[in-house]
Image (cartoon, rainbow, N blue to C red):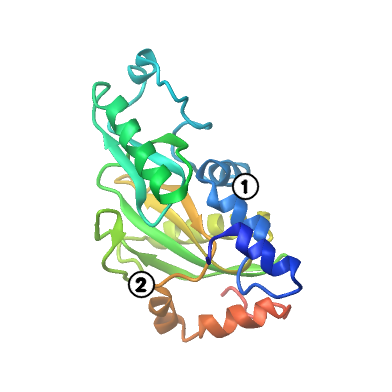
Amino acid sequence: LSENAAFCKAVEDNGLIFIGPRSETIELLGDKLASREAASKAGLPVLPGSDKPLPQEFPLEMANQVKYPVLVKASAGGGGRGIRLANSPAELPEVIRAARQEALAAFGDDSVFLESMVLQARHIEVQIIGDGQGKVICLGERECSIQRRHQKLIEESPAPCLSGSVRTAMYHAAEKLGSSLNFRGLGTVEFLLDQKDEFHFIEVNPRIQVEHPVTEMVTGLDLVKEQILLALGNPLTLEQQ
């Protein structure tokens, strides 16, 4: 329920406080296509891909125009589900069908889109915290490139692969997106870093994540305590230094 916008809205409508982002933020970021658009508007580098859900009948001529390998991703996806890889035009129709089936079973929504596959990418996530009053800062990053079936196995902070300039640019991008969303609470802005040291936005997790103790150990902050204080309406007193 941590990323269920309808549940969050019900909590708010009943005069209770939801510890986490606002319902409209969760709804926006729960749609991968909408979050890609929000990131693009905020000036973040977004991976090439389709801006709208794929049609139910995917034209063969469109498959021949795609650059391979390519990922088919569920618009309502999360937790590594609803992601399939196609290596050729011949594979694409069946991969789309399988991704739709998985997305419908997992999320009740079979909308899928295409996104470029970044080969030999590093997966970097930036922890942000915001007070919903315009202030957003970054609490470092975690590298989670070692995965199995799109599930993270090892989290390392600081990320050993980042130069100072790339780290600064990544923080700035995450902060810009968080500020544009007037983000409240804890969130993770996720990026892929390619072999040329260029990073690309992929998604935002609008909640505290299971790997948050890694950041707590590095920063010395109690993130659970911080998100409760923010939910109570307290301003963010932490400074970015």
**Which numbered disc, 2 or 1, marks the residue that appears first in the sequence?**
1
> Is 29 placed left or right of 214 in the picture?
right
Identify which residue is drawn at 42% across, 61% down: 125
Which of 25 and 192 lies nearest the eye of the viewer?
A: 25
Secondary element type, mark 1: loop
Compared to residue 99, the image places residue 174 above or below, namely below
Identify which residue is drawn at 51% across, 85% down: 222
Tell me, yes or no, if residue 133 can be seen here: no
Which of 228 and 7 lies nearest the eye of the viewer?
A: 7
Identify residue for label 2. 157
Residue type indicated by callout 1? Ala
Image quadrant occupied by the C terminus:
bottom right
Identify which residue is drawn at 47% across, 37% down: 111
Residue count near mark 1 (Cα–Cα under 10 Å), binned few <14, some 14–19, many ≥20: some
Residue 203 pos. (x, y %): 48, 51
Residue type indicated by callout 2? Ser
Secondary element type, mark 2: loop
> Total number of numbered labels?
2
Compared to residue 129, the image places residue 238 above or below, namely below
Residue 31 pos. (x, y %): 54, 46
Identify residue for label 1. 42
Quadrant for residue 6, please give it.
Answer: bottom right
Residue count near mark 2 (Cα–Cα under 10 Å), binned few <14, some 14–19, many ≥20: some
Quadrant for residue 159, please give it.
Answer: bottom left
Which of 103 and 230 lies nearest the eye of the viewer?
A: 103
